[in-house]
């Protein structure tokens, strides 16, 4: 029987203690309302979660609210098993992804408190096997903790080519670039200084002192039966809409400190309590006051986390309604998570969804914190945030028009209220905002391998007229376009065009196209020749790079992406 995830319904009687908000079931596993004010807060939050999960097509979600005194509430929503229509279980683990970075940062700050680590000392002096090449100042532990190292973000820690070294693209601290590579290296640094393997290190330094008895420090197939059933996109090499078909995800092994922890909401409530208390656990401090100040300090501007965000050590630092908060999200192959803690007023929330659909449940944790703040201040609870329909385009009329390719092929884009539709040779389809400005996913069931991206007459003016559209290597213009239409392209670049793939779920597919005299990755990221490799220019200072190799019969057979190998596929 198929499940309509718009409703995320539960069968009656499946879980004792479930309460209903309309036809939406909520299971409180701990933290029953202690007052009428609590009951009102929980109900308001449940109503928003119902709206949010329906809009985002989430299968299931776990959520915890906690403050300086402990866990206030654990709630589970929706389904842990779509096929059997089984609710999320109270003791099932969720992979928390990059929220794990704050855990390894705390371990390193503990080692700093113990006098074993100088945060400003070159990291190569501690782990000399970490192969770094830089014409700038030496990279330190501080630089890795703040994502300011200038190293590529998702490169393998030890490239298969023993001669390859990770190149720093800029001076340490000059720019923020999210770096999983650096955090995996930090995990090895902690192991080197502590003497225990990472699982034992996490257990002894954080889990046991906080009473996080159900959490697992690394993700292996041995813990798969403890995980909630989890899902990823059925069509995993194309842009997906929110309602795209899901498939049960394969088990994974992930043991790097960049994202290796699996936990329950209740255990994450204990972690929130420690952060809300400035590094103090129920029995002893995990961090000195000085170390916690370093942990939660705004070290470097981090607009990737939001226009007002900075990054501390393993955690983003921001403001919410005037209060300082620390927050992080986590995206795994089949999980999406969010942590947000108000360190001024001392409460926070953690939420995790058992699917990977491209978003993070930050609106839920943010609204939960706003509700708790209003309750603490004896103010009226805030209204539920406005609905966010998948197909809403607030400025839909900007894109309406006819776009023509050089060969005469046309795209017709129509606006209908706040919705957009595109007509191509294979039909008429709605467009869903893709998250980036002027970019949309074609809701055609995954048939389009690229997003539909528009460009304006003045790229620096977001209100100027839309005059271009592109779909991979296809380029269309309107009658108002006045720029060049012919471009010089090196002949050898034609060999690089194609579909490349690595079956590692963290890498997957990428497609290289030629458009307007440039090579583009996945139709949206321009490549810029930089010596013996191409730099990705989705951000001005990106350290990510592409290198093409092994030309056979006029076609490149291998693409190296910041050190990872992807291989040409027969079909584009």
Image: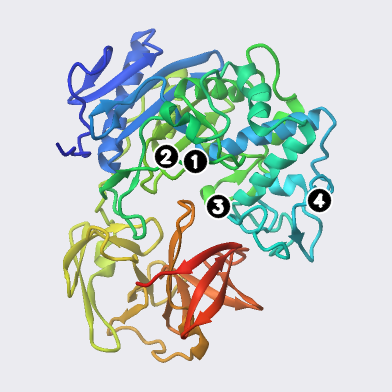
Q: Position of residue 122 (x, y in %)?
A: 82, 49
Point 28% across, 22% down: residue? 26
Question: Which secondary structure lies at badge 3?
Answer: helix
In this rendering, would 103 be left or right of 364? Answer: right
Relative depth, front residue between 475 and 222: 222
| Mark 3 vs 1: CB contact within 8 A | no
Residue 380 in sight from this viewpoint: no
Point 51% across, 32% down: residue? 340
Q: CA distance from mark 2 to mark 3?
A: 23 Å
Between discs 1 and 2, the one toward the N terminus: 1
Rendering quarter of residue 522: bottom left
Relative depth, front residue between 517 and 66: 517
Between label 1 and label 4, give the one nearer the viewer.
Answer: 4
Identify the mark at residue 303; answer none if there is no mark. 3
Name the residue tied to disc 1: 330
In this rendering, would 44 be left or right of 377? Answer: left
Between discs 1 and 4, the one toward the N terminus: 4
Q: Position of residue 557 (x, y in %)?
A: 49, 74
Between label 2 and label 3, give the one nearer the viewer.
Answer: 2
| Mark 3 vs 4: CB contact within 8 A | no
Task: Please tell me how crowded label 1 is: few (under 14), some (14-19), or many (20+) other residues with Cα within 10 Å.
Answer: many
Between label 1 and label 2, give the one nearer the viewer.
Answer: 2
Between discs 3 and 1, the one toward the N terminus: 3
Q: CA distance from mark 3 to mark 1?
A: 17 Å
Between discs 4 and 2, the one toward the N terminus: 4
Name the residue tied to disc 2: 335
Rendering quarter of residue 86: top left
| Mark 1 vs 2: CB contact within 8 A | yes
Task: Please tell me how crowded label 2 is: few (under 14), some (14-19), or many (20+) other residues with Cα within 10 Å.
Answer: many
């Amino acid at each position: 029987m198929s499940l309509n995830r718009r409703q995320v319904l539960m069968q009656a009687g499946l879980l004792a203690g479930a309460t209903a908000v309309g036809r939406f079931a909520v299971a409180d596993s701990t933290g029953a309302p202690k007052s009428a004010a609590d009951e009102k807060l929980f109900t308001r939050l449940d109503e928003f979660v119902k709206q949010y999960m329906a809009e985002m097509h989430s299968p299931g979600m776990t959520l915890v609210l906690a403050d300086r005194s402990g866990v206030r509430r654990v709630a589970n929503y929706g389904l842990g098993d779509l096929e059997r229509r089984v609710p999320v279980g109270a003791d099932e683990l969720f992979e928390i992804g990059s929220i794990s970075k704050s855990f390894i940062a705390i371990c390193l700050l503990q080692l700093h408190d113990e006098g074993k680590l100088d945060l400003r000392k070159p990291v190569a002096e501690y782990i000399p096997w970490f192969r770094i090449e830089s014409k700038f100042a030496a990279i330190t532990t501080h630089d890795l903790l703040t994502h300011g190292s200038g190293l590529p973000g998702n490169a393998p820690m030890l490239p298969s080519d023993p001669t390859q070294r990770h190149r720093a693209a800029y001076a340490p601290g000059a720019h923020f670039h999210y770096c999983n590579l650096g955090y995996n290296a930090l995990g090895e640094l902690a192991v080197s200084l502590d003497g225990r393997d990472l699982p034992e290190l996490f257990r002894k330094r954080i889990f046991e002192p906080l009473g996080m008895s159900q959490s697992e420090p690394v993700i292996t197939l041995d813990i798969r039966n403890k995980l909630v059933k989890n899902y990823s996109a059925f069509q995993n090499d194309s842009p997906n809409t929110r309602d795209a078909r899901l498939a049960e995800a394969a088990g994974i092994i992930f043991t790097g400190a960049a994202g290796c922890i699996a936990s329950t909401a209740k255990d994450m409530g204990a972690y929130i309590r420690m952060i809300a208390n400035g590094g103090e656990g129920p029995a002893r401090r995990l961090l000195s006051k000085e170390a916690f100040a370093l942990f939660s300090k705004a070290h470097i501007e981090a607009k990737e986390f939001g226009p007002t965000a900075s990054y501390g050590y393993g955690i983003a630092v921001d403001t919410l309604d005037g209060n300082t908060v620390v927050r992080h999200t986590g995206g795994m192959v089949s999980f999406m998570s969010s942590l947000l803690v108000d360190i001024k007023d001392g409460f926070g929330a953690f939420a995790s969804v058992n699917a990977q659909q491209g978003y993070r449940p930050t609106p839920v944790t943010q609204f939960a914190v706003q509700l708790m703040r209003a309750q603490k201040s004896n103010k009226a609870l805030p209204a539920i945030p406005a609905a966010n329909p998948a197909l809403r385009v607030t400025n839909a009329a900007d894109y309406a028009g006819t776009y023509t390719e050089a060969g005469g092929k046309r795209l017709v884009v129509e606006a209908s209220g706040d919705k957009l539709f595109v007509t191509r040779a294979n039909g008429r389809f709605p467009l869903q905002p893709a998250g980036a400005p002027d970019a949309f996913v074609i809701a055609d069931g995954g048939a389009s391998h690229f997003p539909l991206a528009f460009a304006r007459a003045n790229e620096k003016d977001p209100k100027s007229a839309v005059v271009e559209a592109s779909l991979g290597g296809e380029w269309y213009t309107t009658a108002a376009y006045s720029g060049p239409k012919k471009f010089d392209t090196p002949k050898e670049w034609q060999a690089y065009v194609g579909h490349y793939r690595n079956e590692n779920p963290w890498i997957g597919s990428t497609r290289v196209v030629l458009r307007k005299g440039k090579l583009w990755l996945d139709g949206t990221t321009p490549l810029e020749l930089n010596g013996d490799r191409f730099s990705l220019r989705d951000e001005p200072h990106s350290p990510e790079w592409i290198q093409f190799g092994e030309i056979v019969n006029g076609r490149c057979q291998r693409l190296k992406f910041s050190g990872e190998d992807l291989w040409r596929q027969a079909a584009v």
